[in-house]
Image (spheres, rainbow, N blue to C red):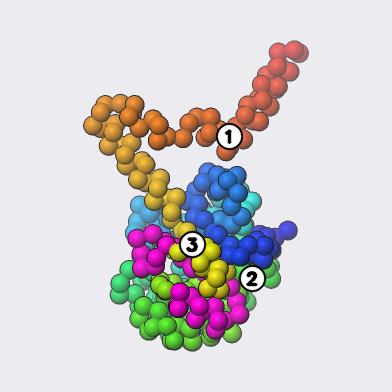
Amino acid sequence: MSAGKKFRDALKANQPLQIVGTINAYSAMMAKQIGHQAIYLSGGGVANASYGLPDLGMTSLNDVIADVQRITSACDLPLMVDIDTGWGGAFNIAKTIRDMEKAGAAAVHLEDQVAQKRCGHRPNKEIVSTEEMVDRIKAAVDARTDKDFFIMARTDSFAQEGLEAAIERAKAYVAAGADGIFAEAVQTEEHYRAFSEALDVPILANMTEFGKTELWNKQELADWGVGMVLYPLSAFRAMNKAAELVYRTLLNDGDQKAVVDTMQTRMDLYDYLGYHDYEQKLDALFAEGKNK
Ligand SMILES: C[C@](O)(C(=O)O)[C@H](CC(=O)O)C(=O)O
Ligand SMILES: [Mg+2]
C-alpha cells in the first residue's frame, strides 16, 4: 500500500486525524508505538534541529529530504512533510513532489507565502497572488505519480487579508487540485467553522504552542468540522526544555543525579528500538560460532 493511501485511510478512520511532529527517526518510532497514526516533519523543525537555523526559508529541498528519508526508513506511519513554498518555480515544485514521493512521504503542505517565508505565527508575512499559488498547486498536482499522494495547500493569508479573502483563496486552491486546506494562524471556532463549511476537503488546524491559536482539544475541533489536527513541534519543544535542564544541572551541580528521574531509562530507550531482538540474534550467532 502506498504511503499516500495509508494517509488517506488514516484520515478516513479518524475524525479528526491527529498528526504529531517527529523531529527524527527515533521520535517517529516512539509516536507509532504509543499509538499515533500519522506523523509530521516540520520545516521549522528541520531548520532548527538539523541545521541550527531559523524557520525563514533557508533550508533546501535536499536538507529536508535527508530527514524524510531517515524517518521513513525507520517508521512506516504515513508522514506529512512541510515543503514550505516548494523551493522555486513550477519545475522545482514538480521535482520537490517527485522527490518527496520517492523518499516515502505520504503528504505535503505547500504554502502561499513569498519565498522569503516566516513561521506562520509571526508578524509581517508576505503572500503571493492567488494566481501564483494556483500555479504552484497545479505544478505539484501534475507532478505526483501516486494519485493518493496527498497535496495540501496552506494559506497564510488570514493574517493579512482576513477571513473572507482567506476562504476565497482556499476555494481557488481546491479548484486547482488541493486535497486539503491548512488554515494557518486562524484563531476561533467561527474561523474553523467558516473554513469547513465553505470547503468540501479536509481542513487542518495547527495547534502549535506559543503562537496565535489557542490550544483547542481535538473534540472541539472535530465539532467545528476540522479533519486534521497538527502538533508540529510539541515533542521537540519538550525535549529541548528537558535537555536545557540537564545541561544546566551538569554545569551547576557537577553531576546529573538531580535530573536522572527526568530521563528516559536505558531499558525504555531500547524497547522502542526493538534492541533486544537484535541482541538475541547476535547472541544466537555468537553461540552458533562457538559450537562449530
Ligand atoms: C507548522 C510550521 O510550519 C512548522 O514548520 O512546523 C510552523 C510551526 C511553528 O513555527 O510553530 C508554522 O509556521 O506554523
Ligand atoms: Mg513550516
Q: Nearer the viewer, residue 38 or 4?
A: 38
The residue sitting at 27% across, 37% down in the picture is 248
Gap in Å between the C-alphas at discs 3 and 2?
A: 33 Å
Residue 9 pos. (x, y %): 68, 63
Labels 2 and 1 touching (C-beta < 8 A)? no
Q: Which mark is residue 217?
A: 3
**Element type at mark 2:** loop
Labels 3 and 2 touching (C-beta < 8 A)? no
Answer whether residue 190 is magenta in the image: yes
Q: Which mark is residue 271?
A: 1
Q: Label 2 neighbourhood size at 10 Å, few (<14), some (14-19), many (20+)?
A: many
Residue 34 pos. (x, y %): 58, 46
Please state which amino acid type lies under the numbered disc 2.
Arg
Left or right side of 186 for 276: right
Which stretch did the figure color magenta?
Answer: 189-215
Q: Residue furthest left?
A: 252
The mark closer to the camera, 2 or 1, is: 1
Gap in Å between the C-alphas at discs 2 and 1?
A: 37 Å
Asked if residue 167 can be seen in this view, the reply is: yes
The residue sitting at 60% across, 76% down in the picture is 201
Residue 166 pos. (x, y %): 45, 82
Please state which amino acid type lies under the numbered disc 1.
Asp
Q: Label 3 neighbourhood size at 10 Å, few (<14), some (14-19), many (20+)?
A: few
Quarter of the image where one finds residue 147: bottom right
Q: Quadrant of the N terminus?
A: bottom right
**Element type at mark 1:** helix
The numbered mark, 2 or 1, whose residue comes first in the sequence reads 2
Q: Label 1 neighbourhood size at 10 Å, few (<14), some (14-19), many (20+)?
A: some
Please state which amino acid type lies under the numbered disc 3.
Asn
Residue topped by disc 2: 144
The numbered mark, 1 or 3, whose residue comes first in the sequence reads 3
